[in-house]
Image (cartoon, rainbow, N blue to C red):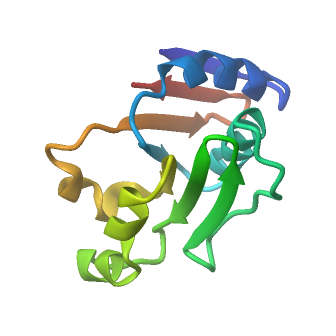
Amino acid sequence: MQFNIEKIEDWQKVVDSILPELKHNILLLKGNLGAGKTTFTQFLLKNLGSEDEVNSPTYSIVNEYNSQKGKIFHFDLYRLKNIDEVYDIGIEEYLDNSFLCIIEWPEVYEDELYGLDYHSMNINNTGQSREITFD
């Protein structure tokens, strides 16, 4: 799936299209700084019935949210330098005990997902719009 976003309200159309396609409990979010990864997450969680305030987990590394479907964990792995640091935060336990894990900056961990089912979203900020691919 591909989308083009020109204004913040367009995120809702993306979420409306993606929600029925979410079959796995892992969603990787890739994109440059300021691309809209956290903004997308805010729209997604609202549509999943979460009333929690959604913030970037840049400094906390992981934020936990409640939804009608279960726990949602939102990771930002940007500051983690190697796979050992990812395991030190207990990522496997989060993955095993969640309705959904949203992982921003997943590159340091992505190879470890071999053999697991997950979704991936790429957000490219062109300056004029956001180009999004989802699979």
Please give left or right for residue 15 compared with residue 102 in the image.
Answer: right
Note whether 28 is above or below 60 in the view shown.
above
Q: Residue at x 58, y 26 (%)?
A: 131
In the rendered structure, the answer to whether residue 25 lies left or right of residue 31 reads left
Considering only vertical position in the picture, is 94 above or below 100? Answer: below
In the image: residue 33, left or right of residue 112: right
Q: Position of residue 66 (x, y in %)?
A: 69, 55
Q: Residue at x 33, y 82 (%)?
A: 85
Point out the image quarter for the C terminus.
top left
Residue in front for this viewpoint, 88 or 23: 23
Residue at point 59%, 24% (across, down): 19
* Residue 70 percent across, percent down from the top left: 59, 49
The residue at 38%/58% (across/down) is 95
Is residue 96 found left or right of 125 in the rendered image? left
Relative vertical location of residue 40 with respect to residue 2 in this rendering, above or below: below
> Which sits in the foreground, 50 or 58?
50
Is the residue 3 above or below the residue 92 in the image? above
Q: In which quarter of the view is residue 69 placed?
A: top right
List x then y, in percent, for residue 127: 70, 37
- Among the 4 quarters of the image, the one containing residue 15: top right
Front in this rendered view, residue 127 or 81:
81
Could you say which is closer to the camera, residue 67 or residue 62? 67
Residue 72 placed where, x, y %? 58, 53
